Image (cartoon, grey):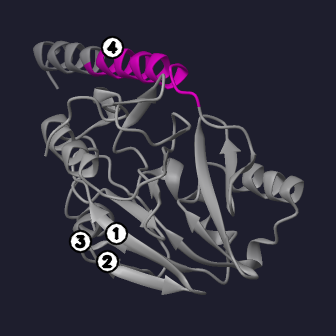
Amino acid sequence: MGKTTKKILGTVFGLVVLLSAGVLVKVHLETRKMSSADTGKIVGGVYAVQDSYVNLFLIKAHDTYVAIDAGNDAGRIQGELRRLQIDPEKVAAIFLTHSDPDHIAACSLFSKAVIYLSRAEEQMVNGQTARFLFLKNKLNYPHKLLEDNQIVTISGMEIKGISTPGHTPGSMCFLVNGTYLFTGDSMGLKGGKVTQFNKIFNMDSVAQASSIGRLAGVPGVEYIFTSHYGYTRFNQTAFGNWKE
């Protein structure tokens, strides 16, 4: 290998390292802006489980639970469930808002749960679509695919999937019993007002803005629960000027 080639390769490597470092710093700074909800019962049968900067939620139905997402660290989640005195084996289903690693870690902990994922998100876990450059998501568990507006009934609880592309192509929000809206990373909250999620993490922020407009038109919502920015009681000003 000639000196010129080595010099070029060295320069390219250096640029890649600098770029990667810059991205990691930006990711760290954006993550510090997040404000997940503390572990505990919120309203009705809804429980928040805090896993560092992210929440998963559990909704109780009779003697079973439905999980919205599965967090970032299975060990930490297990400890939080002990605090809540919730047996992970009583979780009957996990509805994943998308397939990013900080939303799927405890899938193995809920050993008896059926996992649901948006059909449009399947491209993110089957190798078809990269999350960022050459990085790809993985979901090494059997799962069922959901269509937009599909309703699944578990222990008398109705969970409706609403397609909200933007953060990822197959991001999906879940409306539970027509009143509780779980949005994953499809939006943020600030002062009780809906905001876009951190754009550095979105694959298509324009599409996400449109998806938020769609959510603004969902009737009957009483509470909005996000994965990284807590929750709010719904009111007419929550979505501000968002339009579908």
Q: Image height check: is 56 above or below 239? A: below
Q: Which dot, 4 or 1, sits closer to the camera?
A: 1
Residue at disc 3, secondary structure: loop
Mark 3 residue type: Asp
Q: Is residue 154 magenta?
A: no
In percent of the image, x 69 and y 63: which residue is there? 45
Q: Quadrant of residue 19?
A: top left
Mark 1 in CB contact with mark 3 (< 8 angstroms): yes
x, y (%) of residue 146? 31, 77
Mark 2 in CB contact with mark 3 (< 8 angstroms): yes
Mark 4 to mark 2: distance in Å?
Answer: 40 Å
Label whose residue precedes the other's in the sequence (4 or 1): 4
Q: Quadrant of residue 91?
A: bottom right
In percent of the image, x 64 and y 62: which residue is there? 58
Closer to us: 221 or 123: 221
Mark 4 to mark 3: distance in Å?
Answer: 41 Å
Which residue was labeled with disc 2? 146
Mark 4 residue type: Leu
